[in-house]
Amino acid sequence: MSLEGRRSQQQQRCGGTYIVLSNVESVETKLQRIAEKARRDPKCRFTSLFHLMNMELLRGCFDRLRKDAAPGIDRVTKEEYAENLLENLAGLVECLHRMAYIPQPVLRVYIPKPGSDKERPLGIPGLEDKLVQAGLVRIMQAIYEQDFTDDSYGFRPGLGCHDALRTLSRAVEGGRINYVVEADIKGFFDNVDQGQLMDFLAHRIADKRVLRYIKRFLKSGIQEDGAYRASERGTPQGGVISPLLANIYLHYTLDLWFQGVFSPSCTGHAHYIRYADDYVACFQNKEDAARFRHEMEQRLHRFGLELALEKTKILEFGPFAQQWARRRGLKAETFDFLGFTHYCARSRDGCCFRMKRKTISKRFSVKLRVYKDWLRANRTLPTPEIMKTTAAKLRGHYAYYGVTDNGKSIRNFAHEARKLLFKWLNRRGKRNCMSWEKFELLLQRYPLPQPRIMVTLW
């Protein structure tokens, strides 16, 4: 249905009038006061939140939307919505406050999986659903950012993968870690128990309108190949609210349990780092690690979740792991976390233990395959554009993978990328039209960024 048709239906439900809510105090100030209240009183249940879903909040959410985002089932783009922005937002606010807004099903499409012939599903919400979800996220973040533990890093303002890796380095290299439990939850976002999630939300949110809209998004369903499918489990596919709901679910399922129940019962030092549904736990004693593996599985099962057994293991890791492995004629084990393989090593002078990391070999290969596929598909572009895009791709790779101790891997990536670039530029004309001498001259004219360490994890 077109935006005009859907807007007409919603105007009829809402009485055909527009109301623009306004207050002297800005939304940002109100959110700060909510955050302060949540910080001071961890048991406070907020009963009046939905009034913040006003023109000011939704206009800010609209400005943050990506211009090139694919349209959902409504087929409305950001540019089209902006043509009558104030009128559209006013109508949306009116319908929201009359509880007449009904989220549309998420449009499911399939896109190529990088480095593979397979496809992966992608959920695309409608434009107004993105706005409403973004507004709810801003309100809920003001509360839950005060509650989330320091062990949680995924999808949080001001935190990222490198922060989690830095914390992991400090924990393991502190000298009291001998065992690591690497864990992953099987199909987490598709298997969240919606009833349990609503119970968790009720610990902090007592505004029935907020809870009702969250439940509507959870139940909005999926549209695929013209067929509708209800969603009885999981969080909204592709929705901007999904990461926050996932963090809330795991906050109550794992974070608080580890911090308040399991860790105090350990006989030795214990540390836990989580990024979304990917997490590791570090222990001084083997008995604590084995008990965590067992009790964690039971804990997850209680909340409708299941471990991915092929990605879950206990391994010796720490200052003595190499020594123990050599006694058995083996190499010390490694584990993968956030795109890096972590392994036991020594400092340059050999006097102390170091946990080092390198790009996971599969990720390395996949990234090169993606770049190769891009070159094949875009080899007819003008040379300056190819060089500009290649430089941007390399900068993005170095920005994430250019971390302490991973210099060799990013240098290898740069080398292989240059070889691919030379190969496909050489295929654009006569055979062997591009010599290495010409290629070097091209690189002088359009220089590529040099691989270097961008992030220090010490």
Image: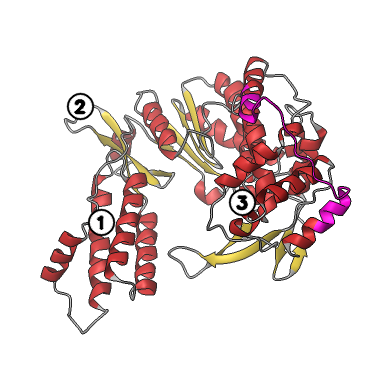
Q: Secondary structure at mark 3?
A: loop
The residue closer to the viewer here, 74 or 58, is 58
The residue closer to the viewer here, 229 or 131, is 131
Q: Where is residue 343 shown, x and y percent of the image?
A: 33, 41
Q: Which residue is mark 2?
A: 351
Give neighbour class at mark 1: few <14, some 14-19, many 20+ (Cα, 10 Å): many
* 21 within the magenta span: yes
Which part of the image, by quadrant, shows the C terminus? Answer: top left
Question: Could one spot residue 257 in this view of the protein?
Answer: no
**Amino acid type, callout 2:** Cys
Which residues, given as a range, are shown in magenta?
8-32
Residue 311 shown left or right of residue 300 in the figure: left
- Residue 170 position (above or below residue 128): above
Q: CA distance from mark 1 to mark 3?
A: 34 Å
Q: Secondary structure at mark 1?
A: helix
Q: Which residue is mark 1?
A: 414
Number of numbered discs overlaid on the protein picture: 3
